[in-house]
Image: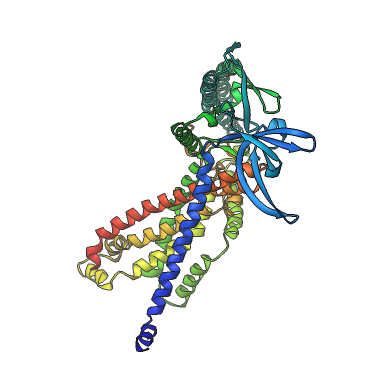
Amino acid sequence: MSSNKKFFQGGQHWVWLNAGAISISIIMVVGLLLLIAVRGLSHFWPADVNTFLVQTEQGVELVMGEIHSHEEDIQDGREREQYLIKTGNRDQYGIDFRWLDLKDVSDTKIDENVVVLERREWGNLYGFIKTVTMDGQSVEPTAENLESIIERANGLHHEIRGIEAGDIGSINYDLEQLRLEQRRLELDNELTPEALADLDKQREELNQQFLSYQSGLQELYTQAKRDSAEFELVGGQTRTVNAEMMVRSFQPNAMGVFAKIGHYFSKLGEFIFDEPREANTEGGVFPAIFGTVLMVLLMSVVVTPLGVIAAVYMREYAKQGPLTRTIRIAVNNLAGVPSIVYGVFGLGFFVYFLGGSIDDLFYPEVKPAPMFGTPGLIWASLTLALLTLPVVIVSTEEGLARIPSAIREGSLALGATKFETLWKTVLPMASPAMMTGLILAVARAAGEVAPLMLVGVVKLAPTLPLDANAPFLHLERKFMHLGFHIYDVGFQSPNVEAARPLVYATALLLVLIIILLNIAAIKIRNNLREKYKSLEQ
């Protein structure tokens, strides 16, 4: 009895309760991540395609597709077992999925000749190769010949995209700059005949280049349309698909383990490095990855110096009194303000006021279309910097408070000024605390979505904020973000069942990016902590 009394009086029960709570939290977090990983990463594995013989009121029907999910429930007092089948062929059936009640399925078979064709539009096609046309000539309808025309079509597609987005995109950008330059000269009353003639000459040169590239594009489009294939669907219907609409073909029922592994990593690479297609339900998420990382980096560059300067002033220079305490309370309260409020503030102050003022002062020629007076990458970064600023301030202040006063006094006694003491001794020793604040800021900012919907993020950005056109980094452009991509695909997609696995995969990718950013910051913090550990002792 005395031992139990000693156990509770010593507070050991609280230690065990805290340890149990932490253990349960870790298990829940790990379990959640495993659930997301399993449901997201399994999407890229090539599933077998089954052919079901279904008894219906109209007779016997053949249904072909992948088993997407399995459900059991009770209806009218009896157990019912259903399969959700991904039938594809949306251009034929109008939908990608349908439910099958197993009591209506009389037979199931797996045919090794079934081909799955991924298309740029209308989703997957499931069927059998009937004919293959290469360079306008009919060839043997084999999987190898189909792969050949798809490989050539993908090469032409990348070449066309390179010309359209690279060469022609640069020409269009230069033409727009010439238009703005002419407008600027008009506003300044400097549009002389000589200046206009020079602009017309440059414009004519660019138009000639454009016509040259346009001619090359027409030739590439013609080449892409020479190849095609005809497929027979399970119901006997046929579909002819031009090679330019094909992305990939494979025969999952005939693939071995190693072939499926290779296909898996090919799809995973496409998901990470390619652009989205089919209303973001197919393809990759590279623009969203790029936008997320770039926004977080810009936010970090802004929030770190602002937070450190504010913390240094309040801790080292401001007179400690009621006003300073009130400011600290206000900073702490800012951390609890809903993020959407920051988004509204960012839209009103950064976009409309600050961006509009910049357009009035420096870019009057772009009116009535705004340049900086519209949501964009820079305003999203500043809004999130403002949102995470309290975290950096509080963390830095705590780091400054932990530095012994003897170190400051010793530095001053050796003849250093207060600024020199602060710059060369105090701030380096407080740098691990600054990095802690930055880590917390990155973790919160990378996952925010609500404010970004108002200040710059979009469903699909045609170009990246970084390209070969001066000034190369275009902070005024809109961008894609993984968090908003998850929201859009999960809740705004016209094809919910097809998009659901991508929601899990994108969520896992966002978590991994946040972890990588945090690991990099933690590594820097630990190096700084080891560097200045001797001074703290």
**Quadrant of the rendering where the C terminus is positioned:** bottom left
Residue 143 appears at what percent x and percent y? 54, 21
**Residue, far top:** 137
Residue 523 lies left or right of residue 251; in this view the side is left
Residue 120 lies left or right of residue 389; in this view the side is right
Residue 317 in view in this figure:
no
**Residue, far front:** 106
Tell me which corner region of the image, top left, top right, bottom left or bottom right, holds residue 125.
top right
- Rendered position, 537 above or below 385: below
Q: Residue at x 32, y 63 (%)?
A: 430
Q: Which residue is drawn at 43% across and 52% down?
A: 300
- Rendered position, 211 above or below 387: above
Residue 24 in view in this figure:
yes
Residue 365 lies left or right of residue 271; in this view the side is right
Q: Which color mode does the image show?
A: rainbow
**Residue, far bottom:** 2
- Rendered position, 120 above or below 517: above
Residue 533 appears at what percent x and percent y? 25, 63
> Number of labelled discs?
0
